[in-house]
Image (cartoon, rainbow, N blue to C red):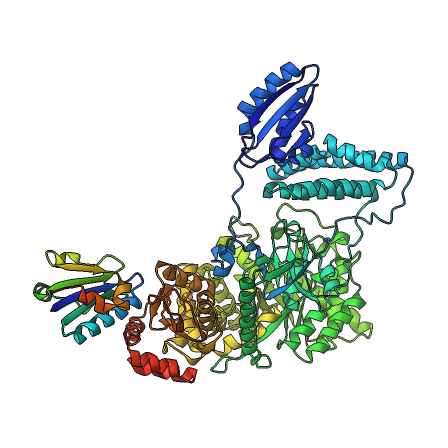
Amino acid sequence: MAQEFAFTFPLPNGLHARPASSLCRAVSRFGSGIVFSNRRTGLSANGRSILALVATLTKHGDECSLRIDGEDEEAAAESLRRFITDDFPNCDEALPARPAPPPGGRVLPRVLREPSARVRAGFPASGGIARAPVLTVRGSGAYPDVDSQTKGTTAAELAKLQSALAVVETALRGRMNDTRNATQFAILGAHLSILSDPELRTRLEAEVRSGEVTAGRAALATADHFAAILRASESELLQERALDLEDLGAQIVRALYGPPVDARPADLREDAIVVAGALAPSQLIALEKGHLRGIVLAQGGRTSHTVILARALGIPCVTGVSGIERWLADGEDVVVDGERGLVVARPSPAVRRFYELEAGKLAAFKARAEAFRAARGTTKDGTRLEVAANVGSLAEARLAFEAGAEGIGLFRTELLFMDRAEPPSEDEQAQIYSETARAAAGRPVIVRTLDVGGDKPIPYLDLPHEHNPVLGCRAVRMYDDHPEIVEAQIRAILRASATGNVKLMFPMISSLEEIRTLRTLVRRFMGELASGGIAYNPRLEIGIMVEVPSAALTVDTLAREADFFSIGSNDLAQYVLAVDRGNEKVARLYNFLHPGFLRVLAQVTADARVAGKWVGLCGELGGSELAAPLLVGLGLDEISMSTPSLATMKAAVARCDTAECRDLVAAALASETAADVEALLRRFAAARHAGSLVAPEAVRLGSVSRTRAEAIREMVDLLHLAGRVDDPDAVEDAVWQREEVYSTGVGFGIAVPHCTSSAVLATSIAVAQFASAVDWDSLDGQPVEMAFLVAVDASAAGEEHLKTIAGLSRRLMDDEFRASLLAAGSAAEVVTLLRDAVVVP
Amino acid sequence: MRIVAVTACPTGVAHTYMAAERLEKAARRLGHLIKVETQGSMGIENELTVEEIERADVVIFAAEVAVRNRERFEGRRIVEVGIQAAIKDPDRILAGLGG
């Protein structure tokens, strides 16, 4: 007589893998057959199979039952009933807090906050905006080539499968023993229990026994089968388990056929957004033939070579969006917002319109910077500041020169050594460096020798796995172990120095001995080249990266051996601030504007100047528009940045006055906090607008905005383009917060949306006159013909401007004044009318 | 009639001044004596004196936020209206004052 009892499913997150495995454990203590049923979904499962249990798609509150049939059914029923009431409700914890969508606490644009918007947030790795259909690409290292395997007899395939399963199991147990990370331990444990799941085993063997497929195909098909079930679930938690199954499938296949072949994606024939777990730089290069519009990666931080390459090629890229390959389907319409680090699937017409306007705005910014492309990097008062590019390949260098680079401030050579079986030869390198020097046509090319360590795996170097790679055997510290590689690279750079303006730079120097040893080595190679009759530049400049604090503090003595210095601001900041910014828990402490870090920079530049050596800066700080006045004030001779920043930074430098910038640096060094420095920089940037409240470029006549939302966004964007607002999303949000109190449509066909926000650089008015009147939910119910958006700077709250705005508000109540504004034929006329009305400055 | 009024709105950037303007204009057109104090982003302006409040026949508060220094008006006849109403139809507010 079978036993059966019913219960209401108690767990808030449904029956996912973790509770399923504890139910499984409870069930397996008994010999009876035990079936779990869900009345709502109508699905049943063998109580011993985690996968089958999970596949019942059970949610909190579902009516469920357990049916027990067998020898020990009474004891089992008794025990399981107690288990379900007492223990089961405690075997899961609350759903992990969902990551906050806006990265860095930024406000999402309003249109993306609609409940229907499908938005995922990641890291904005490469700027720009793109929209195209999705193409998923299997990242590197996924599968060996399964399809080309020949099938043996069914018995042989079964045997292969069993031994592969055993290999994977042993490997999982081994890794569980090795790991000290609790999360990793739990994941490995989950993989192990899935691997021994009876339903999985049955299905695997049935596939092979069908006699039609190889063991590898069977493994992939089985993994796909269960992954599809999980993916169909409504629970995000269950959907994520699908990845585990795919991972396990790949592990079995690797155990069967060895390591993966290089996954070469097919050529893109149409515009696409490529979506992948991870993407090797070589894959990106293979894909980029003009149709690669954007990239979304589940992994990939902010400084991987793929990301650096995407940035150099100007391809929008968002990284760190976990599970993105499952969230997006091939062919699905998607927007990649590389400015904010967002991915928007199936955008609504309003979202599409928003992004068209955003793309238009970016293009306008670009067009304006374009005027500076061919310009020399100089300040307003004529101080020279060379604006150069950071590159990792010859192709990137060519792009940089087209974009106006005045030199290559940093040629990272690591990329040449990655994704290959052996290091590039001296000849190969000499050719690449020489070609770059020729492309530079006399402009300097600073080649930095290899900077790799335990965190960047290069198989043939056999680098040790280190506990703390950034403080370990990286860059010049590993040169002693690889003399042949160092020799080939330095000789190649020397040979290239005969063909153009090449300079040699060593990374991670921390002491005078290191640079002395390396100089001796260079002299030896020079001697060998000379005796071999091979040309090189005997006066080749040899410089060092300043990225280790001990080097930063001894520039005066290092200057005896170094011909120039280049500050590696990313690494130097990491070491000075003791922050790994890849670590989310401490990333917020990583700030280039920390007064302590700025003091180090000031000492480096001052000491280099006293020593008569030139000093540059490569790293992200070099491309920061807000920080440009600091870079000028510090007295750098060169700044080097990623290619898309070149023109913007030339424009930013051209706005600077050297004396003002020196005062700014003095004030920054004396500041108490990074936030103070940032406020200082923002005030400095706003100063150029100080004299005016309304400018012709912030007036749009004949606006085609159709809705209040569009109109507000348009006016905020006008202020953004005019450089008066630096976070348009935050300003838009502030305007709407006010708008939601009650409409600013005051009647008479006008609206006065307004806000006070710290994202406003300079208090300003934007004006839009609409081609067809816009509904504003106005006091008098009439649509709006003209809107005046007032954005007030929260920090300064300039009294004069507020007075003007008050006066203007009063004047807008005057029929004749409004009539004259509506009749204005040009933006300039609107500005004049507003100015004359209340003596607007 | 002698009227004193206070206008105030949430951000104090625009509506405070628009309402003041509308009330002043309408009152003058209708032959009333009016003084409007604005409580906005620039603080209190055109501040009402004790004497002006004493002599007024009626006090209008056109405010979306609490009126500052409200105790000055204790014992006076106060008509409270929304700031939007003051902008939309000040004539109607004035007509509703009677007297």
Name the image quarter holding residue A387.
bottom right
- Image quarter (top left, top right, bottom left or bottom right) of the C terminus of chain A: bottom left
Give residue A547's position: percent from left, percent from top: 57, 60
Q: Nearer the viewer, residue A588 or A422?
A: A588
Q: Nearer the viewer, residue A213 or A247?
A: A213
Give residue B10's position: percent from left, percent from top: 30, 61
Residue A31 vs A634, above or below: the answer is above
Residue A155 vs A812, above or below: the answer is above
- Image quarter (top left, top right, bottom left or bottom right) of the N terminus of chain A: top right
Residue A17 appears left or right of B66: right
Residue A499 appears left or right of A94: right
Residue A199 appears left or right of A717: right
Give residue A541's position: percent from left, percent from top: 65, 73
Residue A648 appears left or right of A422: left
Give residue A700's position: percent from left, percent from top: 45, 77
Residue B44 in view in this figure: no
Name the image quarter holding residue B16.
bottom left
Q: Residue at x 53, y 63 (%)?
A: A350
Q: Residue at x 66, y 57 (%)?
A: A332
Q: Disc count in the image?
A: 0
Name the image quarter holding residue A358.
bottom right
Residue A408 in view in this figure: yes
Q: Residue at x 50, y 75 (%)?
A: A652
Residue A631 vs A472, above or below: the answer is below
